[in-house]
Amino acid sequence: MDITFKNVNYIYQQNSPFAHKAIDDLSFHIPSGSFVAIIGHTGSGKSTLIQHLNGLVVPSEGEVRVGDFLLTKDKKPKNMKELRSRIGVVFQYPEHQLFEETVEKDIAFGPTNFHVDAEEIKRRIHEIVPLVGLSSDFLKRSPFDLSGGQMRRVAIAGVLAVRPDVLVLDEPTAGLDPRGQKEIMHMFYSMHKQQNLTTILVTHSMEDALKYADHVIILNKGTKYMEGRPEEVFIQKEALHRVQLDVPEVIQFLDQFEKKFNQPIPFMRQSIVDIAKSIRNVVKGDASK
C-alpha cells in the first residue's frame, strides 16, 4: 500500500486561541513494501503524522492518500472501517491495551470487530502465535499471568490478526531490555519481508533505523527536516546535531577513527555507506532463515 502526504498541515484546536500547528506543509511518499523510519524529538509531529494514516485525524490542509483511500479536510472515505482494518498500529506499551480473560480472546478481538469469520479467526491465531514467539499453550492462559515481554507479543499478535497491509510501529521496543529489543525488532523485520508489509517505524533509535529501514524521514517542529537512505542521512552529523539528534554508534566510531588517523572524508563516507549496507545485508540474511 503506497502512502503519500501532499502539502499536509494539521492544526490542533483550529480557530481557537489555543491553535497549534503540529504538522507544517509536510510532503513525502512511501512506496508499498518499503520499511521507513520516522525520527524526531517529542513535539516534532511524529504522533500526529501516524494518526493521519488511519483517519484518526484528517489534514487541516493538503491531502493524505493511503492506497486508494483519500483523506482531506472536506473528504473522508466512506469505508473508513476498511481503511482501519488495513493499517495495523503497534503503540508504545501495547500490553496496556490487553483486557480479555484469555490470550486467545484478546488476539481475536480485532478481527472479530472487523467481522472476520470465526473459523478464519481461529486459523489466523494459530498461524500468528508462533510468528510472535509464543506457543499454542499460551492461548487459554490469562494475559495478565504472563511476563511483560510475553504480554507485548500477545498485543502484537492481536494487531497482526487483522492482517494489515501497513504496519505502524510506535517505539515498539520501549521498556524492553537489550535482548528483548533485538528479538522484537528482528521479529518485525522478518514479518515485513515475509508478508511484504509496508512498515513505518517511529523511533528514537538511530541504530534500529540504520539496521532495518530502507528510507529515513526526520521531522523537526512539524516539518520534514531531512530525508533519504539511512547511510546517506546519518553521515550528516552537524545537521543532525542541530536538531539534537545523535548519529548511530558505528558512525560515531568511524568519525573518531577519522580524527585519530586523519583519513580523508570521502574515504570515511564510502566506508560508512559500505558498513551500513553490510549491516542491513546481515539483518536481511537472518530474517530469511
Image (spheres, rainbow, N blue to C red):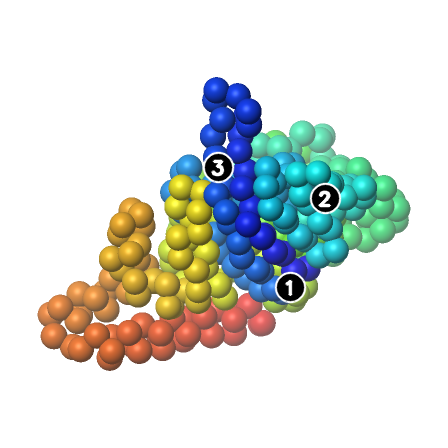
Numbered disc total = 3
Q: Which residue is mark 3?
A: 22
- Which circle's residue, 3 or 2, is located before the other in the chain? 3
- Percent from the top left, x then y, of residue 75? 73, 41
Q: Amino acid at mark 3?
A: Ala
Q: Amino acid at mark 2?
A: Arg
- Which circle's residue, 1 or 3, is located before the other in the chain? 3
- How would you rate the neighbour count of disc 2 (Cα within 10 Å): few for under 14, some for 14-19, many for 20 or more? some
276 up-or-down from 114: above or below: below
- Percent from the top left, x then y, of residue 23? 49, 41
The residue depicted at 50 percent of the width and 66 percent of the height is 214
Disc 3 versus disc 2: nearer the observer: 3
- How would you rate the neighbour count of disc 3 (Cα within 10 Å): few for under 14, some for 14-19, many for 20 or more? some
Residue in the foreground of this view, choosing between 265 and 200: 265
Q: Which residue is mark 1?
A: 32
Q: Quadrant of the N terminus?
A: bottom right
Quadrant of residue 288 within the rendered picture: bottom right
The residue depicted at 30 percent of the width and 65 percent of the height is 235
Q: Amino acid at mark 1?
A: Ser
Helix, strand or loop at mark 3: strand
Q: Is residue 283 visible?
A: yes
- Which circle's residue, 2 or 1, is located before the other in the chain? 1
The residue depicted at 82 percent of the width and 47 percent of the height is 121
Q: Which residue is mark 2?
A: 84
Residue in the foreground of this view, choosing between 45 and 193: 45
